[in-house]
Amino acid sequence: MTDTFKTIARFQYSSEAQIIKGRLEADGIEVFLSDNLTIDTDPLISNAIGGVKLKVYSHQSETALEILNAINKYSVDDEGQAIICPTCKSKKIELFSTIKDAKSLIWFIFGVLFSALPFYTRHKYRCEACQTEFDLK
Ligand SMILES: [Zn+2]
């Protein structure tokens, strides 16, 4: 039987991913990071490529997610303050990448080639409670 991988978390910087990796490994879960080397080389592209992906074997993903949920902190701003939903004031805000289809991927590659990040391949925040998507500013 071949095992497949499942991405269970994304991080903007590999240092964050390393911390979580260590935590999961302490519980016997094998963790694989992807794009961490790329992002270490050029942290500025982290947002554009969707951050450092933390992957585990599919059969361990449920356990891994439980641990992750237990230690999960919702998105905070640069000062460490919880980000609050502009619509319903919930603090359950998650960060997600806006690269979700082939078209934005093509724009991303285009942006890398011309050293300018395309305007819509960046992270946005999404409220878990009411699903509002918003930018910080
Ligand atoms: Zn909300």
Image (spheres, helix red, strand yellow):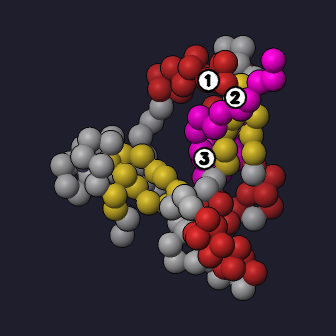
The mark lying in front, picked from 1 and 3, is: 1
Q: Quadrant of the N terminus?
A: top right
Looking at the rendered structure, the kind of residue marked 1 is Ser
Crowd around label 2: few <14 · some 14–19 · many ≥20 (10 Å): many
Looking at the rendered structure, the kind of residue marked 2 is Val
Residue carrying label 2: 56
Q: Give the distance between the C-alpha atoms of the residues marked 1 and 2, in whole angstroms.
A: 6 Å
**Looking at the rendered structure, which numbered label has been put on residue 61?**
1
Residue carrying label 3: 11
Q: Residue drawn at (67%, 66%), measured in percent from left and top? A: 45
Residue 84 located within the stretch drawn in magenta: no
Foreground pick, 11 / 96: 96
Q: Is residue 124 left or right of residue 43?
A: left
Extreme residue toward the front, this view = 1
Q: Earlier in the sequence, mark 2 or mark 3?
A: 3
Q: Is residue 133 left or right of residue 62?
A: left
The residue segment tinted magenta is: 1-19
Q: Give the distance between the C-alpha atoms of the residues marked 1 and 3, in whole angstroms.
A: 17 Å
